Image (cartoon, grey):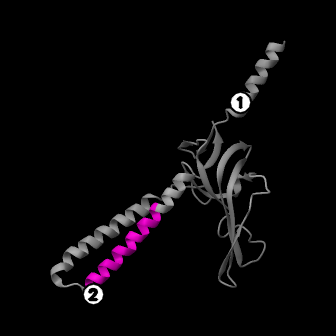
């Protein structure tokens, strides 16, 4: 009897800790690793906080890792949470950053509240992508300024080579910036929305 109870307890523990989570739509399942980090937008620009004021809306951005799924809710270990209010009256965005030092980092969110999410391999990957995007932006601006300077100040003999160089610089910067953009998984306002699911 003791052996049977121990065996059942082990099965239940394995089932709790062995929950595998993925992102799925009607055609595809993307597995989620423990190291994956998500940036999730709760609500949308025209949905969240609308009852507060008729001309005011906003959204909440959450960064963290997915710990588990319970029915239609997900449990997220939050590393950053930012709420943005957009006030049309004063043409201004207000940001509220939350300090989690004295708060539980585990929070539950209903899947129906998710508007869109981005998935990254790790926190390091987020920083790398943001740095490369910034470099790409600098190269694009540099290419534009080089071409303008070439057209205004350079002589005809050097103009062709300088324009080619600026075009290459612009193209490389744009490609670099675009390549860093993660795939967006939309949970709303699409024909085939994504959902978290266990498998």
Does residue 30 lie above or below 16 as drawn? below
Helix, strand or loop: magenta stretch: helix
Let me know if residue 140 is in the magenta part: yes
| x and y percentages locating residue 86 in the rendered image | 67, 75
Nearer the observer: mark 2 or 1; the answer is 2
| x and y percentages locating residue 69 in the rendered image | 71, 43
Task: Name the side, left or right, on which 13 lies relative to 140.
Answer: right
Q: Residue at x 54, y 52 (%)?
A: 124
Q: Nearer the viewer, residue 127 or 72?
A: 127
User: Mark 2 and mark 1: span between their CA atoms?
Assistant: 69 Å
Read off the residue under disc 1.
Answer: 15
Task: Name the side, left or right, on which 31 lies relative to 73.
Answer: left
Q: Nearer the viewer, residue 178 or 197?
A: 178
In the picture as drawn, the residue positioned furthest to the right comes out as 1
Read off the residue under disc 2.
Answer: 152
Q: Nearer the viewer, residue 98 or 71?
A: 98
Q: Which residues are magenta?
A: 132-152
State the quadrant of the N terminus.
Answer: top right
Location of residue 41 by image quarter: bottom right
Task: Name the side, left or right, on which 61 lies relative to 152.
Answer: right
In the picture as drawn, the residue positioned furthest to the front comes out as 101
């Amino acid at each position: 009897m003791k052996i049977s109870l121990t065996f059942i307890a082990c099965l239940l523990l394995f089932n709790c800790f062995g929950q595998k989570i993925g992102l799925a739509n009607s055609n595809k399942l993307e597995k989620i690793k423990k190291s994956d980090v998500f940036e999730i937008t709760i609500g949308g620009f025209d949905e969240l906080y609308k009852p507060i004021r008729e001309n005011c809306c906003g959204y909440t951005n959450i960064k963290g890792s997915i710990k588990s799924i319970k029915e239609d809710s997900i449990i997220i270990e939050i590393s950053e949470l930012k709420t943005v209010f957009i006030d049309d009256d004063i043409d201004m965005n207000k940001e509220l950053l939350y300090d989690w030092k004295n708060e539980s980092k585990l929070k539950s969110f209903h899947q129906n509240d998710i508007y869109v999410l981005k998935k990254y391999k790790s926190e390091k990957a987020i920083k790398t992508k943001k740095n490369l995007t910034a470099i790409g932006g600098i190269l694009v601006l540099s290419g534009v300024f080089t071409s303008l300077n070439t057209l205004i100040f350079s002589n005809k003999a050097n103009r062709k080579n300088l324009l080619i160089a600026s075009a290459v610089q612009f193209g490389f910067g744009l490609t670099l910036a675009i390549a860093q953009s993660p795939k967006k998984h939309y949970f709303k306002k699409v024909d085939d929305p994504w959902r978290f699911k266990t498998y």
